[in-house]
Image (tube, rainbow, N blue to C red):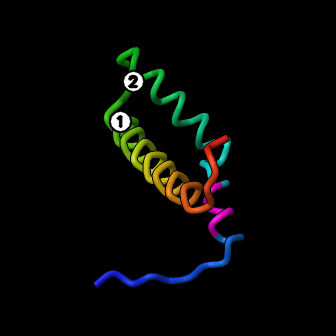
Amino acid sequence: MPATIEAPASWIESIGDFRLPPETDRQLQSLMDRNTEGLLQPAEKEELSALAALSEEISLLRAQALQLLGKRPA
């Protein structure tokens, strides 16, 4: 049975503001660009897959937090 836990709005706001660190975001973009060009090594493909999954999870969490706050993504 799902449980509801109350959280301070500031916690939810911090989740809504969460993003990959800039260096990690740049690495993800670089890997995506190199993947498009067909230049990735197998280890880089694994890294791309992991970073893309992490980015997607963060995006989903942010969207849920912003929805709870009644805000739109910036």
Q: Amino acid at mark 2?
A: Asn
Image quadrant in which the C terminus is located: top right
Label of residue 45 in the image: 1
Q: Nearer the viewer, residue 73 or 30?
A: 73
Q: Residue furthest left?
A: 1
* Coordinates of residue 20 in the picture (x, y in percent): 60, 48
Residue drawn where x is 50% and y is 57% of the image:
64
Q: Residue furthest front?
A: 70
Residue drawn where x is 62% and y is 43% of the image:
73
**For this view, does 10 lie left or right of residue 25?**
right
The answer for how far apart the CA atoms under marks 2 and 1 are is: 8 Å
Q: Residue furthest top?
A: 37
Report which residue position mark 2 lands on: 35
**For this view, does 10 lie left or right of residue 61?**
right
* Coordinates of residue 18 in the picture (x, y in percent): 63, 55
**What span is colored magenta in the figure?**
12-16
